[in-house]
Amino acid sequence: MPIVLSGVVQGLHHFAWRCRDAEETRHFYEDMLGLPLVHLIRNDHVPSTGEYCPYVHIFFEMADGSFIAFFDLGDDTAAEPSPNTPGWVNHIALRVDSPAELRRMKAHLQEQGVEVLGVTDHHIIESIYFFDPNGIRLELTTPTVSEAVMRDHAKEAHAQLRAWSSEKRLRTEGAAQGAAQ
């Protein structure tokens, strides 16, 4: 019997990623996106592993109290994208309050010289996409359906995932059989 863990995880505390330059990253997230820099940790040793690696860890606060954070390892190197993953897959999606706010942010970012893709309609949300100075793909998004509609989608999610997994298994087994012949 599975252990019920519903409600244990309360929300996102922070998402952390490597950045090339802490000040460049601060400018983008604080001055352009409006997320205040609220904390900085500076250390020469990694607390969890003890290894020597001078760094700063910077935290930007979102309106809900969660954070987006970055590590500057002091070598002017950004994280490299995954070579086996399309560039549109790995991204951070940040919520804004309304379609009007989404469009206002799109115009603001474009005025700052940021290339923005969208507004894209995903049937339950609208989104815009752009990259930060570290090459991290960001999405600003806003819900476009009610909570009741989302609850209805939740009722179907497990069945839809089982169907996807079954179809995927058939495809990969078929591809493996074709390669073996």
Image (spheres, helix red, strand yellow):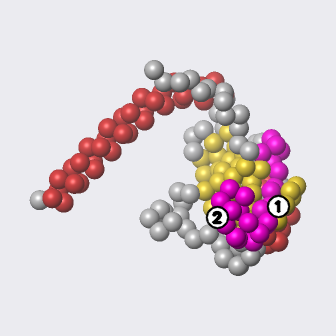
Residue 63 located within the stretch drawn in magenta: yes
Q: Which residue is mark 2?
A: 136
Question: Which region of the structure is painted magenta?
Answer: 43-66
The quarter holding residue 136 reads: bottom right
Do residues under tags 2 and 1 come within 8 Å of each other at their CB atoms? no
Expressed as whole percent of the image width and height from the top left, the position of residue 156 reads 48, 27
Q: Residue at x 77, y 50 (%)?
A: 67
- Between 69 and 48, which is closer to the camera in this rendering? 48
Q: Residue at x 65, y 46 (%)?
A: 126
The first of marks 2 and 1 along the sequence is: 1
Residue 78, numbered circle? none
Residue 36 appears left or right of 9 = right
Q: Quadrant of the N terminus?
A: top left
Q: Secondary structure at mark 1?
A: strand
- Between 167 and 120, which is closer to the camera in this rendering? 167
Q: Residue at x 26, y 43 (%)?
A: 170
Q: Residue at x 22, y 54 (%)?
A: 176
Q: Name the amino acid, label 2.
A: Ile
